[in-house]
Image (cartoon, rainbow, N blue to C red):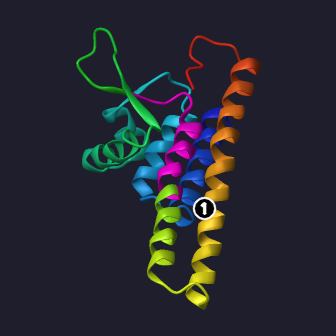
Amino acid sequence: MGTNERLRDAAEKLALTLSAGGGMQRSTARVLTALLYTEQDTMTAADLCAELSISSGAVSTAIKHLIPVGLIERVPAPGSRRDHYRFRSGAWAALMSQQNMLLATMRDSAQEGIDATSADTVTARRLHEMQDFYTFMLNELVPLIDRWREQYTADHPSPDTSL
């Protein structure tokens, strides 16, 4: 099996995992993994359609989901009229950083429930556990991502290491 076939198989395997266990739409997962595993610097929507044998509408929808969460980016391609896309440097840390908003929302929701219930109830105990968990995660995740960025940048100095 050649390198391209092995990369394509690995991409499809990850796409299945992201769609089955990660809650991502299958075509979105396939576009993401195609951009992650490609040997090309960038791909156009037409490239993605051809590579994945999916419709331009499916590619367009996937791109609309992936750009705002910071996993892929639109990049200029001198001399080309088409939009070019690539997997974004620092995407994994950016994705985890976005989870901070969800963590804060969950913590705040627990506090709203705590404020609305009596102190010595089973509801209050569950909500305190929820609040403590999400507070802990928020306190730990931010510095953890920062440390990873510092370590990665130190280990992989590059002009494209804009994490």
Kind of element beneath mark 1: helix
- Numbered label tally: 1
| Range shown magenta | 85-103
The residue lying toward the viewer, choosing from 139 and 151, is 139
Relative height, residue 83 to residue 126 (above, below)? above
Instruction: State whether the magenta stretch is mostly helix, strand or loop.
Output: helix
Q: If the image is split into quadrants, where does the N terminus sit?
A: top right
Q: Is residue 27 above or below residue 34?
A: below
| Position of the C terminus by quadrant | top right
Residue placed at 54% from the left, 43% from the top? 97
- When the figure is inspected, residue 65 is found, relative to residue 157, above or below; the finding is below
95 in the magenta segment:
yes
Camera-side residue: 84 or 88?
A: 88
**What type is the residue that disc 1 sits on?**
Tyr
Pick the residue in front: 124 or 142: 124
Q: Is residue 130 above or below residue 56?
A: below
Q: Which of the pair 75/125 is nearer the observer?
A: 125
Q: Position of residue 94 (x, y in %)?
A: 53, 38
Q: Residue furthest front?
A: 119
62 to the left or right of 16: left
**Residue at 31% of width from left, 34% of height from top?**
46
Q: Position of residue 108 (x, y in %)?
A: 48, 63
Read off the residue under disc 1: 134
Give residue 13's position: percent from left, percent from top: 61, 54
Q: Is 59 in the magenta?
A: no
- Please provide percent x and percent y for residue 137: 65, 55
Residue at the bottom extreme of this rendering? 121
Categorize mark 1 by other alpha carbons within 10 Å: few (<14), some (14-19), many (20+): many
